[in-house]
């Protein structure tokens, strides 16, 4: 588990910890163990009553594709040791991170039952391929929407093993009622202190691993936010390939002499409760994070989604898309500021999501060998058959 997965599954972990049918084992890895991202993570996890059963020091830093590939390989090596020591019955993974693919691969090779949360979605970048690969390694599938369920079954998975349970991310956002802790935000990050009684933007912009240029789009976004001259909380990019390009663009911009917007605070990481409190109060969320597609949909927060990273995802009317152009981004943000909050959407929300996951896991049949379930394929049109297509 890394910092992002913890944030989105905190309530689920609480239920797994409390359920007498399940013995929860927690493995922490990835950016959660990096000081620049996760210095508060493990203590917070332990203060919440969880025991860290193993730690994966699996991150090769470098911010490029080779470092990302080597991190996946190191994750496989490290997690092999974890599985040998802990010997669980079920390995639970979530989402589309390349580290999760390594975990699912190792678990499948050592004959463990793999349960996967959030399969079947479509999106941009290599993440979609990773998500579908995990689906083919997993035995139990817990998807967030009916379209995703249909896709997982279409990939040859047994229909009885695919459950549409909604999004744990959105469930957590719906349950969390903490208000913004202004003192906390003054104590972290760098830059301008935010007056949360006044409007502010959130920016979450991460690398797109399948695109060559991450610097140019980041510069376009910086220029658009600078021109708005509005209070902004900007989250540092994640550790995927391309992160160094975005980080350099931010540093160069921040050190420039012609900056209009001096009201930006840059942060690396906050606890999930504080993130949701911040998101709930934001005037607009700008960037390419899935939080803009999912959590913001339930909270009714206007979103400007930039580029291809979330391409194809099921989304509500609160999302306005923009390309890598300063003027287009600027105009989209202004339009969302003018619109204001949207009605809450239940595209990804279902009640009792985490309770259903716990029940599915507690009652699951342990599986090793998978079978591909062939679906009926309609015949090709006669005109195509005639020419040998």
Image (tube, rainbow, N blue to C red):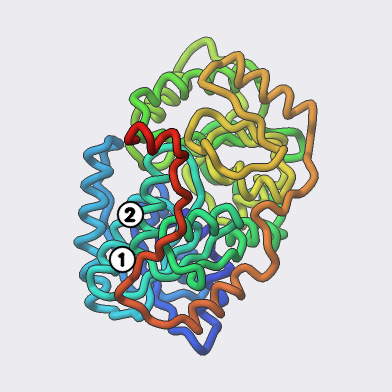
What is the spatial separation of the Cα atoms under label 2 and label 1, in whole angstroms? 13 Å
Q: Is residue 188 above or below residue 234?
A: below
The residue lying toward the viewer, choosing from 181 and 312, is 312
- Closer to us: 191 or 241: 241
What is the x, y in percent for residue 24?
44, 79
Residue 346 is situated, as x and y percent measured from the top left of the image, at: 72, 54
Residue 18 falls in image quadrant = bottom right
Image coords of residue 251 (percent x, y): 42, 25
Of 131 and 226, the residue lying toward us: 131
Q: Residue furthest top?
A: 258
Disc 2: which residue? 99
**From the viewer's perspective, is 81 left or right of 299?**
left
Residue linked to disc 1: 55
How busy is the neighbourhood of tag 2: few (under 14 within 10 Å), some, or many (20 plus)? many
Dot 1 surroundings within 10 Å: few (below 14), some, or many (20 or more)? some
Residue 261 seen in this snapshot: no
In terms of secondary structure, where does tag 1 sit? strand
Q: Are marks 2 and 1 in contact (CB under 8 Å)?
A: no
Name the residue rendered at 63%, 61% in the picture.
172
Image quarter (top left, top right, bottom left or bottom right) of the C terminus: top left
Mark sitting earlier along the chain (2/1): 1
**Does dot 2 land on a helix, a strand or a loop?**
helix
Front-lying residue, 180 or 125: 125
- Residue at 38% across, 81% down: 366
**Image coords of residue 261 (percent x, y):** 60, 20
Above or below for 27 versus 226: below
**239 is higher (above) or lower (below) than 57:** above
* Tag nearer the camera, 2 or 1: 2
Q: Is residue 11 visible?
A: yes
Residue 53 left/right relative to 165: left
Query: What residue is rendered at 55% in x and 67% in y?
Result: 163
Quadrant into which the N terminus falls: bottom left
């Amino acid at each position: 588990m890394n910092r992002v997965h913890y944030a989105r599954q905190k309530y689920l972990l609480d239920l797994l910890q409390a359920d007498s049918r399940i013995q929860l084992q927690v493995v922490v890895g990835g950016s959660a163990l990096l000081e620049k991202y996760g210095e508060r993570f493990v203590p917070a996890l332990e203060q919440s009553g969880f025991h860290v059963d193993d730690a994966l020091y699996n991150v090769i830093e470098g911010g490029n594709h080779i470092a990302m590939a080597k991190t996946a390989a190191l994750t496989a090596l490290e997690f092999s040791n974890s599985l040998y020591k802990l010997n669980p019955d079920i390995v639970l993974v979530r989402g589309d991170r390349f580290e999760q693919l390594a975990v699912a691969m190792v678990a499948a090779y050592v004959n463990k039952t793999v349960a996967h949360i959030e399969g079947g979605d479509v999106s941009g970048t290599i993440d979609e391929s990773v998500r579908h690969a995990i689906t083919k390694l997993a035995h139990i599938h817990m998807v967030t929407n009916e379209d995703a369920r249909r896709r997982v079954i279409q990939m040859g998975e047994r229909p009885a093993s695919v459950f549409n349970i909604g999004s744990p991310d959105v469930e957590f956002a719906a349950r969390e009622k903490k208000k913004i802790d202004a003192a906390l935000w003054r104590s972290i990050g760098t830059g301008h202190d935010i007056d949360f009684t006044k409007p502010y933007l959130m920016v979450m912009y991460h690398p797109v691993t399948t695109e060559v240029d991450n610097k140019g789009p980041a510069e376009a976004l910086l220029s658009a936010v600078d021109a708005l001259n509005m209070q902004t909380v900007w989250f540092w990019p994640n550790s995927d390939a391309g992160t160094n390009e975005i980080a350099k663009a931010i540093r160069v911009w921040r050190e420039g002499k012609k900056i209009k917007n001096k009201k930006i605070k840059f942060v690396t990481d906050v606890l999930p409760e504080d993130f949701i409190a911040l998101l709930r109060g934001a005037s607009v969320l700008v960037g390419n994070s899935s939080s803009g597609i999912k959590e913001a949909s339930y909270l009714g927060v206007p979103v400007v989604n930039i580029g291809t990273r979330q391409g194809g995802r099921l989304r509500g009317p609160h999302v306005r898309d923009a390309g890598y152009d300063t003027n287009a981004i600027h105009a989209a943000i202004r339009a969302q500021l003018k619109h204001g909050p949207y009605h809450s959407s239940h595209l990804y929300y279902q009640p009792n999501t985490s309770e259903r996951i716990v029940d599915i896991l507690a009652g699951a049949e342990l599986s090793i060998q998978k079978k591909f379930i062939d679906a009926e394929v309609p015949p090709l049109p006669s005109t195509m058959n005639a020419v040998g297509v």
